[in-house]
Structure formats: C-alpha cells, structure tokens
Image: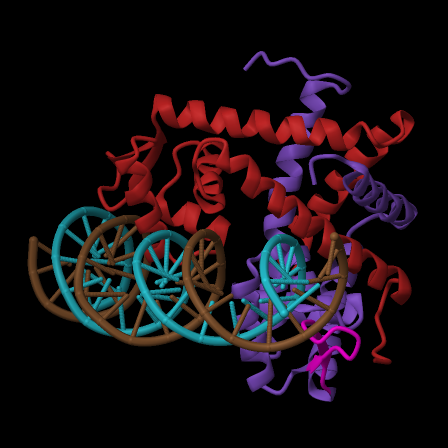
Chain colours: A red, B purple, C brown, D cyan
DNA sequence: ATGGATTAGTTGTATTATACAATTACGATT
DNA sequence: AATCGTAATTGTATAATACAACTAATCCAT
C-alpha cells in the first residue's frame, strides 16, 4: 500500500495503469472483432501480422514475440498452413529453421484485417480533437520506445 | 489496399495501429507476469481488478467488461471462491443477482498485483523524458475517452 | 573428424479456457 | 396466476495452452 516508487508520482502511475488496463482490454476486443471479418481467431491474426511484420520469420521468432510456447505456435502454424494462409519453407542456410511465409490468400487476409483495424482507429481518432492527434501519436510512440528500453519487458 | 478513410491521414493510422498492436501485446505479457506474483492467471487478475474497480458488481457485469461468456466467468468465479479470494453474496434487492466481493486475501492479492504493475510502469516511464510524461498521460486519457465515445467499441 | 552439447521444430499428453445450449431460480408484466 | 425476461449455473464439446519427450540439424571442443 505505502510502497515507495522511485522516479514518478505514484498517483499518476496508478492512473496510467488503470487507463492502460481498460484501453488494452478494449483494443483486444476490437482486434478479436477485426479478425472475425476473415473467420480468424485473435491469435491467428497476430500470427499473420507478425509473419508480415518480421518478414519470413522462423517459428521460434513468432512464438517469442507472441509469448507463446513453440509447441502452441507449431499447431497454429499447422492450422494456418491447412487453411492455405501461410507456407513453411525450410531455410537453405540452416535446415533446422523453417521460414514462415504468407501465401497470396494470407496476404489478402492480413490486409483485410489491417484495413478493418484502421477503420476502427479512424472512427476512434475522429473523437479526438484534431490538434491533439499528433500528440497522441507521438505519445504512443514514446511509450512503446520506453517499453523497448525498459528492463521489464 | 486503396480503401479511402474518412477523417484521418491513412499513413498515420497505419502507424498508430502498428504501435498499439505491439504496445498492447507487450503490456499483456507484463500483466501476465504481474499476475504470477500471486500465482494467478491473467484472466483471474482481471476478474479481481474489475470486482475492485466496479465495486461489488454482478457476474454479468464482469463478464461484459471482460468480453467473456457468463458461463466462462461463472467458472472463474467458482475457482476464485475456492481459492478464498472472492465471495458470492446474493443481492438482497433482487435475489437473482450475485454480488461479487473481494475477501481480505483477495484485496491483498489485488493490491499486490497493482503494486507490481505500478513498479513496471515506473520503470517504463523513467525512460520517457520528464517533460513528456504529462503529455503521455493526457494522450492515453484522450484515447480512452475517444474509445468510450466511439461507436465501434 | 567426431561425439557431446545445443537449437529448431514436432508430437504426445494433460490441463485449462471457452462458448453455446439447456436448466433453474427469480422477478416483472399483464 | 400465467407468461415472459433475466441472472446465474451446469452439461458438453471444442480449442488453446504448456510441458515433456523426441527427431533432426548444427556447433564446438578436444
């Protein structure tokens, strides 16, 4: 209760935590809804997203960024291959690695979900005063960078 | 690909989406880690959090804010009751309702997780230039309010 | 070089999370 | 009182997940 926190105002941190908690949950629900436009689950959509973002990553790479066990991810990959959305390709340099690659259909779905999410965000941002939008953008970026530099995540 | 978006700069939206996607996933992993300090799962910690935040809500209330089916939540409640962290109390005004109440131990855990999360956030915020912290705070608040006013969530 | 350690991925297994449907109990409407 | 609607629970099937064991490929130290 009366823990001391080093560098910040405690009340402000409590406030930020509460806001992030709610924000993140809501955005998660939105993502789930967005994925449904292609008949995909939330996790499946994240897998496609990361394959696209990381550029033909290995199975382990994706498992790590998503915080899932490699066995769990292996099964997701299996499912997505069966749905014709991604391909496994053995790496030529190290045959232990499997490169994950989006198929045409996979790209199409990834794009469709992306557009859906952007449509949602467009709606949301329209409720923010125009002169504040750049600030919000910058702030999210600051927060993300801070997380990257932080020891805890 | 060339969808038109109404009010915002498209590239900015793509950027915000990407940042939020990563931010939210990382924060989710952090929450999971934070919950583990009490041997709880992520969902369990959210249930405790919402019981505390909403102030003795009904089972349906909590299911709704978490986006879970009431049956799923009923089982989580069952588990948390068995662990002695919450109590079910039949509402006196309408006996169909069950009020969910944190026990002393439940409060203790909720507090402990909260402190853990605040410790993480303190660390993260320390990597943001001091003069930008209020701006970040305000921006998250703006975004949250915008979501509340938005039709899509 | 070669035999042991290391790494990537898959598969076996058990557990947990989840949704939907049916049911029970209560309250509101008429 | 009869019917309808709502809150919660329980039955059931399915999906998600982790951990452990395993296979295959590579690395490395002697």
Q: Position of residue A67 (x, y in %)?
A: 49, 55
Which quadrant holds the N terminus of chain A? Answer: bottom right
Is residue C19 or residue B144 the one in the foreground?
C19
- Decide if residue A118 is on the left or right side of residue A92: right
* Residue B42 makes an appearance in the image: no
Task: Establish if B145 lies above or below B29.
Answer: above
**Quarter holding residue A140:** top right
At horizontal 30% and vertical 43% (from top left) the residue drawn is A79
At horizontal 50% and vertical 24% (from top left) the residue drawn is A111
Q: Position of residue A92 (x, y in %)?
A: 24, 34
Task: Establish if A145 lies above or below A15.
Answer: above
**Quarter holding residue A144:** top right
Magenta residues span: B89-103
Residue B94 drawn in magenta: yes
Q: Position of residue D9 (x, y in %)?
A: 53, 75
At horizontal 67% and vertical 72% (from top left) the residue drawn is B96
Residue A104 drawn in magenta: no
Which quadrant holds the C terminus of chain A? Answer: bottom right
Q: How many marks?
A: 0
């Amino acid at each position: 209760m009366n823990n001391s926190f080093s560098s910040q105002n405690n009340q402000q941190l409590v406030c930020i935590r509460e806001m992030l908690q709610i924000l993140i949950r809501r955005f998660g629900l939105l993502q789930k809804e967005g994925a449904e436009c292609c008949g995909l689950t939330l996790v499946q959509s994240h897998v496609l997203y990361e394959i696209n973002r990381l550029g033909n990553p290995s199975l382990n790479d994706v498992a790590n960024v998503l915080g899932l066990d490699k066995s769990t991810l292996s099964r997701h990959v299996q499912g997505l291959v069966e749905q014709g959305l991604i391909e496994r390709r053995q790496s030529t340099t190290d045959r232990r690695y499997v490169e994950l690659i989006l198929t045409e259909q996979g790209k199409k779905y990834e794009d469709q979900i992306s557009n859906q999410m952007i449509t949602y965000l467009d709606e949301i941002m329209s409720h923010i005063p125009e002169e504040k939008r750049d600030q919000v953008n910058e702030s999210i970026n600051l927060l993300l960078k801070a997380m990257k530099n932080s020891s805890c995540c």
